[in-house]
Amino acid sequence: MDIRSDFLVIGSGIAGLMFALKVAEHGTVAIATKKAAMESNTRYAQGGIASVFDSVDSFDLHIQDTLSAGDGLCNREVVEAVVRDGPARIRELIELGVHFNVREGSPEGAREPDLDLGREGGHSQKRIVHAQDMTGQEIERVLVEHVRRHPRITIYEHHIAVDLITFSSRMRRGQVTTTHLDHCCGAYVLDRSSGRVKTMEAKITLLATGGSGKVYLYTSNPDIATGDGIAMAYRAGATIANLEFVQFHPTCLFHPEAKNFLISEAVRGEGGVLLDASGKSFMERYDPQRDLACRDVVARAIDTELKKSGEDSVFLDISHKSSDRIRNRFPNLYEKCLSFGIDMTRQPIPVVPAAHYMCGGVVTDMVGRADIQRLYVIGESACTGLHGANRLASNSLCEALVYANAAAATAVEEVRGAEDTAVPEPPPWDEVGTTDSDEMIVVSHNWDEIRRLMWNYVGIVRSDKRLERARRRIEIIQAEIQEYYWNFRVSADLIELRNIAVVAEQIIRCASHRKESRGLHYNIGYPRRDDNRWRKDTVIRRPFLG
C-alpha cells in the first residue's frame, strides 16, 4: 500500500479544501491534486458568492431567482437548504481570514461586516459577496494556507487520479467491473514527477475535481478542467445526470493572445451593456431584463448576433461609468485588458461566449453521497439538484461551501461507524504488457478533434443531425483511445484525454435524449419547453459489464 488515510480528497478547490479542513479534526486526510494546490477552478472565479446579506433581500427571493434560472428542473428542497445555509458558510470563510469587500465607511473589526454586495444576471437583488474581481483567488489563498499548516493533512501535488477503486470489483490497471454493492476504498493516482501509479487507500473518498470546460474548444476554464471526477465515477458505476446542461458564459475576452480569460458577469451587473459591431445595443430584443438576463439567454443572443453579422465578436461597454469606479471594482480585469491594449474605462471590450460550467454531474443526495458507498462528490463534479437546467450566477461557490459542510459531518460519522469494518487491501496497479508510447500524436489529434466536434455539434445551439454526427465520431474516437490505453503506460495527457472523451460521449447521449429546449439545452428541432414529457432529469448509468 503506497498511501493510506481516513479521508482521500481528490481536488484542491473550495469544495475539497473546506471538506478536508473539517474532517481533519477527526482523522488523517490525503489531498491529491493534479497540479499545484492553488491551481483549481475556484482560483479563477471572479464574480463572487451569491448569498443573502442585504436587508432588502430575502431567502425567498434568492430561492425564487434560483428556481427561475433552473427552468423547472431544480430540486426545491436542495435550493432552500443551500440558500438558507449560505450566510453561515460565508461567515465561516471570514473567520478563516478571507477578506471580502465591505462598503465604504464600514467600521473595522465589526462583528458583522457591512459587505459590499454586487448584482449579476438573473438576480433580483444585490447579493454577490466578492473580493474585488478576484474572489476565487482570495478564497483559495486562505484555504491553501490553512490546509498546509494542518498536521493531519498531507497534500500530494502533481498527482492525477486515474480511476477509483471499489471493493467488489475485478481490477486490471484500475478498470473496474461493478455491481450495485460496490464500496469505494480509494483511487489509483499517477505521480507526475516519477511516472509511477500509486495506490491511495481511504475509508472515505471525496471527488471535488471541478469542471469539464476543456471538453470544448473555447472555454473560460483552466487547462485542468477535464471532467476527471465525472469520468471516474461513471466508469466505477455511479449514476450521472443532466450533462446536456452546459453553461456557456456569454463574455470571454476575444483577443488572439488571450487564453481562457473571463470577463466577469459582474461587469454587466455594474451597468455594462452589450453592443454589436456598429455600436448598437441588442439585448432588449431578446429579454425584458436586457443585459441582466440569465446566461443562457445572453449566450444564445450573442451567438445569434454573430451568426447574423458574420463578425468575430460583440462588445461589452462599461466606459460610461466612472473611471475610478471601474478601476477600483475590477482591478484585475482592468489590468488584464490593458495588457492587451484595451482600456475598459475608455472603450468596449470584445467578447464571445465560451463553455463555462457543468450543471449536471454525478448524482448525489443532500449530503453529497453518490450511489457507490463511501464515495462523496461535491462541487462542479456533482449533480445535487441545485442548478436544474441552468445555474444562477455565483450560486456555485455557495453550493460548494454548503455541501462541503454537510458532506464532512456525514463522512465523519460514517468513518466512526466503519472502524470495525474489514476493508480488503486493493491490488497494486498492474501495467504488465504495456510499453512507453511512441505515438503521442494519437493523444494530441484525438484531444483536438473531440474539442472541435463538441464546439461545432454540441454547442450553444444544437440539432438532431449535429448530435448524430457527434455520436458517430465519438464512438470511433473512444475505440482508438481504449486500444491506446491498454497498450501503453498511462501519462497525464492520456488520462485527461480518456476523461474528456467519456464526458463528451455522455453529454452527447444526454443532449440526444432530451427532445425539447430548456435552460442551457437548445435544440432547433424542438424550440419550446415541454413540461408534459421532459420535466425530469436525464439519468445515465454505465451498463453492467458482467
Image (cartoon, rainbow, N blue to C red):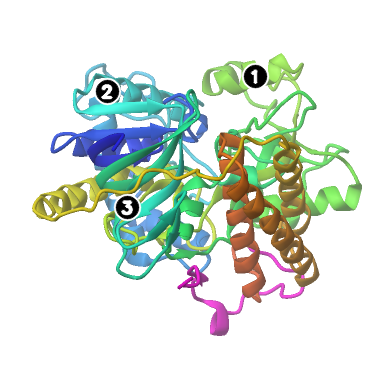
Say above or below: 70 vs 318: below
- Disc 3 vs disc 1: Cβ atoms closer than 8 Å? no
Closer to the chain start, of discs 3 and 1, is 1
Q: Look at mark 1 in the image and give the residue it sits on.
A: 336
- Position of the C terminus by quadrant: bottom left
Q: Using the image as rendered, state which of residue 76 and residue 166 is in the foreground.
A: 166
State the extent of the magenta-drawn residues as a range.
520-546
* Residue 483 place in picture, x, y as percent: 65, 53
- Name the outermost residue toward the front: 433
Q: Look at mark 3 in the image and give the residue it sits on.
A: 376
- Name the outermost residue toward the bottom: 532
Q: Secondary structure at mark 1?
A: helix
Q: What's the residue at 62%, 37% (across, down)? A: 220
User: Which one is in front in this view, the residue at disc 3 or the one at disc 1?
Assistant: 3
Which of the 4 image quarters holds residue 32?
top left
> The residue under label 1 is which amino acid type?
Lys
Please tell me whether residue 539 belongs to the stretch shown in magenta: yes
* Residue 349 place in picture, x, y as percent: 74, 29
* Residue 123 place in picture, x, y as percent: 49, 49
Q: What's the residue at 60%, 38% (across, down)? A: 435
Q: Look at mark 2 in the image and give the residue it sits on.
A: 146
Q: Is residue 380 left or right of residue 149?
A: right
Closer to the chain start, of discs 2 and 1, is 2
Q: Using the image as rendered, state which of residue 442 and residue 136 is in the foreground.
A: 442
Please tell me whether residue 125 belongs to the stretch shown in magenta: no
User: Which one is in front in this view, the residue at disc 2 or the one at disc 1?
Assistant: 2
Per the model, the C-alpha gap separating discs 2 and 1 is 29 Å
Q: What's the residue at 50%, 44% (across, down)? A: 432
Q: Secondary structure at mark 3?
A: strand
- Disc 3 vs disc 2: Cβ atoms closer than 8 Å? no
